């Protein structure tokens, strides 16, 4: 979540994709059920086994209540004491079966639920990694983490005990209802009408609660996203004394979560209150109707019929009413859990419906081998409609040559590079690789030939060796050491106690900017790419280190198609061609000498930078001389 998306007042702005507002997906109950059915189909065998075990469990649970009728009407009323032990044995065995099947059920479905959560997280993560770069530019990492990790949690209520308990409750209620009809059909009809009314109330309640659960997941993801950002940028927070502001933003987010939880709990509490009321009404009916029926059977002279219930029937009826109403009331709780699971599936479905950048790759051409010839033909690109960032760009970068891009900030240099890396696609025109349209090549095949050193180099929280190996995980430690030497990493690596096994911390926080940049260069060297992208690759280095690394980069560029973005014009003198961009257009092109001789925009940039560096050098010399003249205190 960006700062603009969550503010102190709790306002929320729509997510933008390239200037276009992301349309809100309308997710229906049917779509959620389809998602749930697909998920349950994958785990159908465990669910089927769980259902079978559940059926045995529920049937065994009916044995003990049924023995009460024979206990009162046969053993006690007719004094047949010889049936007491068999009844106790039957009830005891049924209880043991119920205990064993309950344990088995939790094991079978518990494992199935955890496997389903694991599988769903992996599927969603794999899908997210293949989404276009523009999506990641508009959504915070914390938001995505919440979607991948938290939204999948609700699956346990579908694959785990939730759905089986729901089905089991219905089975128990159905069997119990049959017994109740047998014992007293008139009382049972009245109870059934009450339960049907309760079912309609629950259905309406779940319809109201489901959007609240969906909204809670969304708010939680936004708050988590901002929290992740504030912790990740803690140095900026402290440097600008922004702790109070971050507290307010976080507090506003948690207040929104609290408001949602409050409304949800109100709905759940209302459900439970209705459940309690239903139980009370059924209890009153049983006292009035059931009591009269027992009275009529026991003392027929005072009643109108001799077809009432015995005491044993009435006790059994009481027990079975409990068996019927308890699952129905439990459905309120289970239904809430399943509603929450559907809310998570809704959000996951929204995410999985987004087209990945490699969609349709199976229809594209393979390019396991390329020479590296890159060409742009009348390329136009825009992030926002009607505001082109690149305008009719045409260029040719023959295989093995170096093309440098210079220009003021916002001139389109990085955008041009992103098109060469297939991070974005042209609005019109073509990007060609060895004469083939880049749109017609398999994306993974093409990117396997690219090595990148960016201005902001990202390192993972692992060892130095692991970060260098990121471009080629199967590389040996000797190969790692070789490229590290070329990138001038060896000197500072040897200063660490654990050498190449030194852990660099999150985003490489334990290293300086220059050290991170050298590791990124070593990583690109190890990849041995055909196409090399250098975006301010030496911006974090001092002049001495830059001069040394330039030699390594020169060897790296040999025989490879290289694109270089550099503000230090002295670093691109050896480029085969230099393109000067302004306002999304190439205004000059040529070699360093040709562009200086032309006296155009490049010459202006060069002279300005040369004078700036020269003045800075003179000022540093004057400061040094002044320090030498200053008397040293005794």
Image: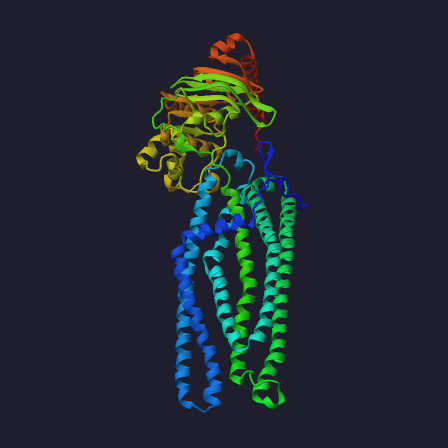
Give the side of residue 69 with respect to residue 190, left or right: left
Q: Is residue 182 left or right of residue 272?
A: left
Q: Is residue 514 above or below residue 599?
A: below
Image coloring type: rainbow
Q: Pick out the residue farthest to the top.
A: 597
Residue 150 visible from this viewpoint: no
User: How many numbered marks appear?
Assistant: 0
From the viewer's perspective, tell me whether residue 629 is left or right of residue 590. right
Q: Quadrant of the N terminus?
A: top right
Q: Is residue 480 visible?
A: yes
Q: Is residue 102 above or below residue 251?
A: below
Picture residue at 55% right of the left edge, 60% below the top: 335
How far from the left and from the top, in percent, is residue 424? Answer: 50, 29
Residue at 60% x, 31% y is 19
Q: Name the spot of residue 538 as percent of width and height, x first.
A: 47, 26
Q: Quadrant of residue 606?
A: top right
Q: Nearer the viewer, residue 347 or 33?
A: 33
The answer to which quarter of the image holds residue 196 is: bottom right
Residue 462, percent from left and from top: 41, 42
Which of the pair 154/136 is nearer the observer?
154
The residue at 50%/62% (across/down) is: 166
């Amino acid at each position: 979540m960006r700062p603009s998306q969550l503010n102190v007042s709790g306002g929320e702005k729509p997510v933008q994709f390239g200037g276009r507002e992301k349309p809100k997906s309308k997710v229906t109950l049917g779509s959620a059920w389809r998602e749930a059915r697909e998920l349950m189909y994958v785990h159908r065998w465990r669910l089927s086994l769980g259902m079978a075990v559940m059926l045995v469990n529920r049937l065994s649970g009916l044995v003990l209540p049924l023995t009460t009728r024979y206990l009162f009407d046969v053993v006690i009323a007719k004094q047949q004491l010889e049936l007491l032990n068999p009844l106790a044995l039957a009830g005891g065995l049924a209880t043991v079966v119920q205990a064993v099947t309950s344990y088995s059920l939790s094991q079978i479905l518990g494992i199935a639920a955890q496997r389903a959560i694991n599988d769903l997280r992996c599927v969603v993560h794999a899908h997210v990694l293949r989404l276009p770069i523009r999506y990641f530019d508009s959504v915070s990492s914390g938001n995505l983490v919440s979607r991948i990790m938290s939204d999948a949690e609700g699956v346990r209520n579908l694959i785990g005990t939730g759905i089986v308990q729901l089905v089991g409750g219905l089975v128990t209620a159905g069997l119990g209802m049959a017994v109740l009809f047998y014992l007293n059909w008139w009382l049972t009809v009245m109870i059934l009408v009450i339960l049907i009314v309760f079912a309609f109330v629950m259905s309406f309640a779940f319809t109201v609660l489901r959007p609240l659960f969906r909204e809670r997941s969304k708010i939680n993801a936004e708050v988590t996203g901002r929290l992740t950002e504030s912790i990740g940028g803690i140095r900026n927070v402290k440097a600008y004394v922004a702790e109070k502001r971050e507290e307010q933003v976080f507090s506003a987010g948690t207040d929104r979560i609290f408001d949602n939880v409050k409304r949800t709990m109100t709905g759940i509490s209302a459900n439970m209150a209705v459940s309690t009321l239903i139980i009370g009404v059924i209890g009153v009916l049983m006292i009035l109707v059931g009591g009269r029926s027992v009275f009529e059977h026991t003392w027929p002279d005072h009643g109108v019929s001799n077809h009432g219930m015995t005491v044993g029937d009435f006790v059994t009826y009481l027990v079975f009413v409990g068996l019927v109403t308890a699952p129905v009331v439990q459905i309120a709780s289970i239904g809430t859990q399943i509603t929450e699971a559907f809310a998570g599936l809704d959000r996951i479905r929204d995410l999985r419906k987004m087209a990945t950048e490699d969609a349709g790759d199976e229809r594209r051409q393979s390019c396991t081998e390329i020479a590296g010839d890159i060409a742009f033909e009348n390329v136009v690109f825009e992030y926002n409609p009607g505001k082109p960032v690149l305008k009719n760009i045409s260029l040719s970068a023959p295989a093995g040559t170096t093309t440098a891009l210079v220009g003021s900030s916002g001139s389109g240099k990085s955008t041009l590079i992103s098109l060469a890396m297939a991070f974005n696609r042209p609005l019109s025109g073509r990007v060609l690789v060895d004469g083939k349209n880049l749109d017609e090549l398999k994306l993974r095949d093409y990117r396997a030939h690219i090595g990148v050193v960016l201005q902001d180099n990202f390192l993972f929280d692992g060892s130095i060796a692991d970060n260098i190996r990121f471009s080629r995980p199967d590389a040996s430690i000797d190969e790692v050491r070789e490229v590290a030497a070329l990138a001038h990493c060896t000197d500072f690596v040897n200063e660490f106690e654990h050498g190449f096994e030194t852990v660099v911390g999150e985003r490489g926080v334990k290293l300086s900017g220059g050290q991170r940049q050298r590791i990124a260069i070593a990583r690109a060297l190890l990849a041995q790419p055909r196409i090399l992208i250098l975006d301010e690759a030496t911006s974090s280095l001092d002049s001495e280190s830059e001069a040394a690394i330039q030699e390594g980069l020169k060897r790296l560029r040999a025989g490879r198609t290289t694109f270089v973005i550099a503000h230090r014009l002295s670093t691109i003198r050896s480029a085969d061609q230099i393109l000067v961009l302004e306002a999304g257009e190439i205004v000059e092109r040529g070699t360093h000498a040709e562009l200086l001789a032309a006296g155009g925009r490049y010459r202006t940039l060069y002279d300005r930078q040369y004078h700036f560096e020269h003045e800075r050098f003179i000022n540093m010399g004057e400061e040094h001389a002044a320090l030498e003249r200053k008397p040293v205190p005794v």
